[in-house]
Amino acid sequence: MISGKDVRPGNWSNVTDLYDNGDFSVIWGNYDGNPKKSLGTRWNGAWDKDDMGYPKTFGNPVWYVEPDILAKGILLTLLEFTLRNPNSGGNKDAIIAALAECFRSA
């Protein structure tokens, strides 16, 4: 299993970790040179240390880029979950900042 903070393929920059509960991770950053930030999600893998989770490309862990139309809903749900469960692995301030960017760019 690999932690989300350790998944940093070259096509992502300015990455902020929003959520990581060990099983699932969510990031906010610039994907593939786009100046508008995107939401990336992934399953970190099973407890087997050799499991790279999903998605992966050629055996390397990567992020799934969520469509813009879903990003606000995911971020709002993630914020609500984090506020209700402060020890869940969510970064409340980073989630709020990502939401603010989403609404500014709408």
Image (cartoon, rainbow, N blue to C red):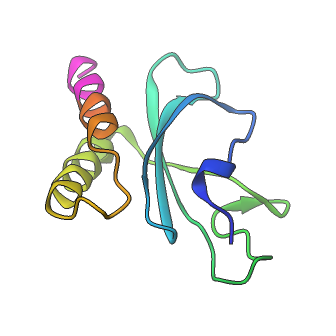
Residue 80 sits in quarter:
bottom left
Q: Is residue 28 magenta?
A: no
* Quarter of the image that includes the C terminus: top left
**Considering only vertical position in the picture, is 73 above or below 85?**
above
Residue range highlighted in magenta = 100-106
**Considering only vertical position in the picture, is 98 above or below 21?**
above
| Numbered circles on residues, count | 0
* Quarter of the image that includes the N terminus: bottom right
- Residue drawn where x is 32% and y is 43% of the image: 71
Point out residue 50 in the picture as x, y percentages from the top left corner: 80, 76
- Residue drawn where x is 24% and y is 35% of the image: 96
For the residue pair 74 and 84, the one nearer the viewer reads as 84
Locate residue 50 relative to residue 29 in the image: left or right.
right
Locate residue 64 relative to residue 60 in the image: left or right.
left
Locate residue 29 relative to residue 105 in the image: left or right.
right
**Considering only vertical position in the picture, is 10 above or below 60?**
above
Point out residue 43 in the picture as x, y percentages from the top left corner: 55, 67
For the residue pair 24 and 83, the one nearer the viewer reads as 83
Which is the main secondary structure of the residues drawn in magenta? helix
- Residue drawn where x is 20% and y is 25% of the image: 103
Point out residue 72 in the picture as x, y percentages from the top left corner: 25, 41
The residue positioned farthest toward the front in the image shown: 87
Point out residue 64 in the picture as x, y percentages from the top left corner: 55, 52
- Residue drawn where x is 45% and y is 21% of the image: 36
Locate residue 41 relative to residue 100 in the image: left or right.
right
Residue 84 sits in quarter:
bottom left
